[in-house]
Image (cartoon, helix red, strand yellow):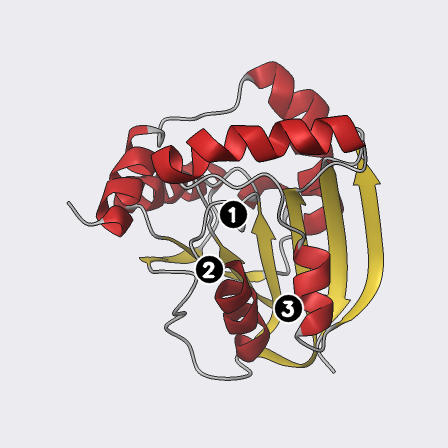
Amino acid sequence: MPRSQRLSALWDRRARGWASPRSEAKYFGPNRRWICARAVGATLEVGCGTGANFAYLGPDITLTALDFAPKMVQTSRAAAATLGRQVHLQVANAQALPFADGQFDCVISTWTLCCVEDEVKAVSEMARVLKPGGRLLLVDHIKSSNRLIGLAQRLVEIVSVPLSGEHYTRRPLKTATDLGLEVVASERSHLGITERLQATKK
């Protein structure tokens, strides 16, 4: 089985939920609120997973969402129905977004860039579909600012990358800056392991 299909199948198996209620309340939830409170207008969510962000997005948001795992999209569709929220959902790859240039006011992605094969290509695609002045909103786990923890993350990647495609030492902020986006807000937490940011397409 090709690697992309194997990873899609892996996330399909996690479609019923992979975060515990406690981690959602204490860690994921606050970061989702930070990201979703900054979303505006026509918004694309890349890597919607189980649809956990839908409840945090304002009613004025016109939402399009995608994931590369079909069962994740099914779970997201059920989450949207439960909330009574209209979401344009589809199966697609973050590294080849099926949208025209400059289509969205905002793109959000939460804990997705750690799992894509080519982070730079994915962020480049997110920037491509943004309108000039549009917002890119990201949160992910990154290489810790603590040297020992950072070393431990490198060791974990020896197993996690080939096994599940999971990266722990990427830095989306640098990627966004290198691609010419202007970072207007960023925060690190949890010993520097987590970073959330807002960037603007010039």
Q: Amino acid at mark 1?
A: Thr
Residue placed under numbered mark 3 in the picture: 41
Q: Nearer the viewer, mark 1 or mark 3?
A: 1
* Any part of residue 112 in sight: yes
**154 or 23: nearer the viewer:** 154
User: Can you tell which quarter of the image residue 193 is in?
Assistant: top right
Q: Is residue 71 above or below residue 107?
A: above
Q: Amino acid at mark 3?
A: Gly
In the visual, does 112 lie left or right of 175? left
Residue at point 24% right, 41% down? 6
Q: Which mark is residue 124?
A: none
Mark 1 and mark 2 lie on one chain; the one further toward the N terminus is 1
Q: Are marks 1 and 3 in contact (CB under 8 Å)?
A: no
User: Can you tell which quarter of the image residue 145 is in?
Assistant: top right
**Residue 73: horizontal and vertical position, in percent?**
34, 46
Residue placed under numbered mark 2 in the picture: 118
In the visual, does 84 lie left or right of 141? left
Estimate how packed mark 3 is, as few (under 14), some (14 to 19) or many (20 or more) residues with alpha carbons within 10 Å. Answer: some
* Any part of residue 39 in sight: no
Q: Is residue 13 above or below residue 182?
A: above
Q: Callout 3: helix, strand or loop?
A: loop
Q: Amino acid at mark 2?
A: Asp
**Residue 63: horizontal and vertical position, in percent?**
51, 60
